[in-house]
Image (tube, rainbow, N blue to C red):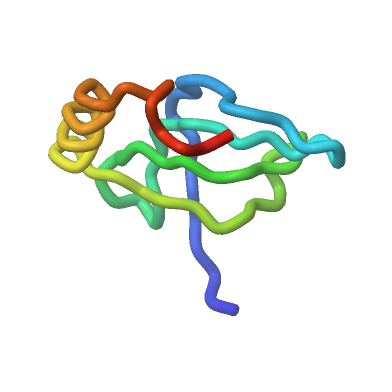
Amino acid sequence: MADFKFDIKNSLGTISESSKGWKREINVMTWNNKKAKVDIREWDEKHEQMGKGITLSKEELKQLKDILNKINIDELEIE
């Protein structure tokens, strides 16, 4: 596995927590000293191990926000 660096610049919040203590978080972070992006993924409590996630640029985050603002969550067929 390739080495990479990450730095959590700002924690925006926790979405959920698993029974094993891992938290799905939204953070502003950098990867390999590149520009900061918004990142959504699961982390162990010490931020030493992580799960798969998604990283969004500012434009992608704006698009996601617009889409979510148009959705009536209660009408979706989800739990």
User: In x, y percent, where is residue 39?
Assistant: 42, 41
Q: Residue at x 74, y 42 (%)?
A: 44
Q: Residue at x 71, y 48 (%)?
A: 48
Q: Is residue 68 left or right of residue 14?
A: left
Relative to 20, does residue 49 appear above or below in the rendering?
below
Nearer-the-camera pick, 33 or 71: 71
Q: Residue at x 20, y 24 (%)?
A: 70
- Quadrant of the snapshot with the C terminus: top right
User: In x, y percent, where is residue 23?
Assistant: 68, 34
Relative to 56, does residue 27 appear above or below in the rendering?
above
Outermost residue to the bottom = 1
Nearer-the-camera pick, 74 or 53: 74
Nearer-the-camera pick, 26 or 66: 66
Q: Is residue 43 left or right of residue 25?
A: right
Q: Residue at x 70, y 52 (%)?
A: 49
Q: Is residue 40 left or right of residue 68?
A: right
Relative to 54, does residue 46 appear above or below in the rendering?
above
- Quadrant of the snapshot with the N terminus: bottom right
